[in-house]
Amino acid sequence: MPSRDALDRDPPRAASEITTSVPGTGTMDAVERSLETQVSQAVDAWLRWLPRWEPATHRGRVAPCRRCLGSPILSAAGLGSDVPHGVQHGLSTRVKTIVDHAVAQYTERNLPMLQGELDQQAARNRARSYRPSEGLEPEFEGLPLDPEPLPGAPFLFTLSGLADEVDAGVPALPPLSEDAKAALRQEVRLADEYANMVGREVCTVLLRHRLRIQAAISQYVEPQITAMLEELTRSLDAPFDPGAGADPGLPEP
């Protein structure tokens, strides 16, 4: 959603993440069939990517991922908290894009004021000369652009900081009247309700793919996690090189 001061004080959650619309079907039955096809394709794409996944070796982030934390999509897919976040994020991002597209199509057909706001925001985005968060693969989309800074070692610059500098030079959107704000909130509420409805349909479809998803986790993810735990256990049990005997820096008893 555009950054309106009055709306920011009472922000509607789901509509703030609506994306550009795509062509789709007209009837609800056709939408349901289309959603089933799209979810199946999203799971297929995720399954093709999963064999390339490797555990991250860099320092973990303190802040949780707002896209994945408590996501009903991940619950429907059977990906619990014991599954690494990188694995979760790749699937939740792909499926969330389906919901975004369905809501965008509904908005374009039925919510002209909200669509106008989104068009203005899209034009504003195009005016930015630097957009580091666009064009990312699903596995990285929605994640912070910069790593957590190390204590005592601040960054000379950050990608998000450069993007903020560019944003400062983009003209602000024109103000809204009180009546327009009220009408826009109403359309945002309708978009939010539609998003929840589509989300429930998507989760229902995901339930049918649980066995495929769990089988892939067992084949590609769990062995890597087990190997990491075994390596950690060995390093804790034998902190010194077993072939070298005792630490050469220690005196003989």
Image (cartoon, helix red, strand yellow):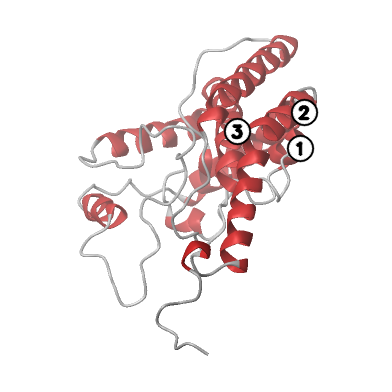
Q: How many marks?
A: 3
Q: Position of residue 62 (x, y in %)?
A: 52, 64
The answer to whether marks 2 and 1 mark residues whose Cβ atoms lie closer than 8 Å is yes
In the image, 138 versus 216, the foreground residue is 216
Q: Determine whether the residue tagged by mark 3 lies in a helix, strand or loop.
A: helix
Q: Residue at x 20, y 64 (%)?
A: 156
Q: Disc 3 residue type?
A: Leu
Q: Position of residue 253 (x, y in %)?
A: 53, 90
Q: Determine whether the residue tagged by mark 1 lies in a helix, strand or loop.
A: loop
Q: Residues within 10 Å of mark 1 (few under 14, many from 20)?
A: some
Q: Disc 2 residue type?
A: Arg
Judge whether residue 232 can be spotted in this image.
yes
Distance between the alpha carbons at the discs numbered 2 and 1? 6 Å
Q: Sequence-wise, which precedes: disc 2 or disc 3? A: 3
Distance between the alpha carbons at the discs numbered 3 and 1? 11 Å
In the image, 98 versus 82, the foreground residue is 82
Mark number displayed over residue 91:
3
Q: Determine whether the residue tagged by mark 2 lies in a helix, strand or loop.
A: helix
